[in-house]
Amino acid sequence: MKKPYLIAEMGVNFYDTARQLNISPLEAAKMYIDEAAEAGIDCAKFQSYKAGTIVSKNSPAYWDTTKEPTKTQYELFLKHDGFNEEDYRELCDYTHKKGMDFTSTPFDYASADYLEGMVDFYKISSSDITNIPFIRHIGSKGKPVYLSVGASYISEVDEAVRTLKDSGCSDITLFHCVLSYPTNPEDANLRIITTLKKIFPDVRVGFSDHVAPDDTMTTLSTAYLLGAEVIEKHFTLDKSLKGNDHYHAGDPEDFKKAISNFNLINKIMGSAEKTVLACEIIPRREARRSLVVVRNMKAGEVISKDDLMPKRPGTGISPKYEDIIIGKKLLRDLDEDAVLTWDMI
């Protein structure tokens, strides 16, 4: 195993940080990038949309309104659609200077087109998995595509994957995702990762997480153990902030903890080859058993079963040769508890 590719989904959380600190959203976004880079994250991801092209004005909220009280999708998106192509270019360049990859999820054709020269890969939201013309448009651009498959049936995932392949996209990653904010732990359904790997063996499989962070980041560790090669999670600098995604996002310390877990998992998973490790050489010898004599014996005596007992250490004749030893004559005198070796018989 190798450490999963880790994506910090900045989304639009930085808008709330900007309001809190009385700075511009662009400055706040750069703060997020700084913290993500310091935490060891591989990719900073944003979202590119305009309220008027993503949702009709009367679309109701589908999130936990006790956490985010905005009642319509249009009102929510309108709060966070201030960036244009130049802003994303600046964020792209800044991210790359920090040593991370950059991407932003496009939610319309205009965004998909102007992001083409910036993103290291395209990310398609679960909400667009049945937007087949849009998937075809993105797939035709010759870049890797990461596709979230939340709230979908396998038949819909299959159609989207076929569309990407037919459009010329050969580098595809599917994200298991639960389209619920936040996702209750009992709904995380992480076994879908193994299902996707089995049904789509020629694509990478990852996990896009909406479960609120726990103290040990167990959800992400479990996803990794089940085979997630890419992990995406919303990122915030302050989980207590009111607003769009802070309540299920991870902060820099959460991400550092997850990375530490991934590294530990890599260490403890080891190799699939069953062999004796260097650290086991001495314990293997000292903790195994040898045949020992249970009484003082003289040279020439014939060894009976009652004369033998398997005891530690394992430096002598193994108990598995007991049948060969029984009936043999001793070549020398032995004291009780002597470990038998082949030169004694």
Image (cartoon, rainbow, N blue to C red):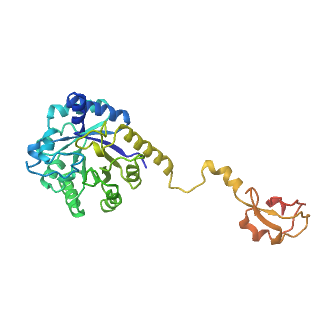
Q: Name the residue nearer the viewer: 281 or 224.
A: 224
Left or right, 241 with reference to 327: left
Total tally of numbered discs in the picture: 0
Q: Position of residue 97 (x, y in %)?
A: 29, 29
The image quarter in which residue 337 lies: bottom right
From the viewer's perspective, is residue 216 above or below residue 345?
above
Q: Where is residue 132 in the image (x, y as percent from the top left)?
A: 14, 55
Q: Position of residue 281 (x, y in %)?
A: 65, 50
Q: Name the residue nearer the viewer: 85 or 68.
A: 68
From the viewer's perspective, is residue 106 above or below residue 300?
above
Q: Position of residue 180 (x, y in %)?
A: 25, 53
The image quarter in which residue 104 lies: top left
Q: Quadrant of the C terminus?
A: bottom right
Left or right, 215 with reference to 235: right
Residue at image point 36% right, 46% down: 213
Q: Name the residue nearer the viewer: 6 or 55.
A: 55
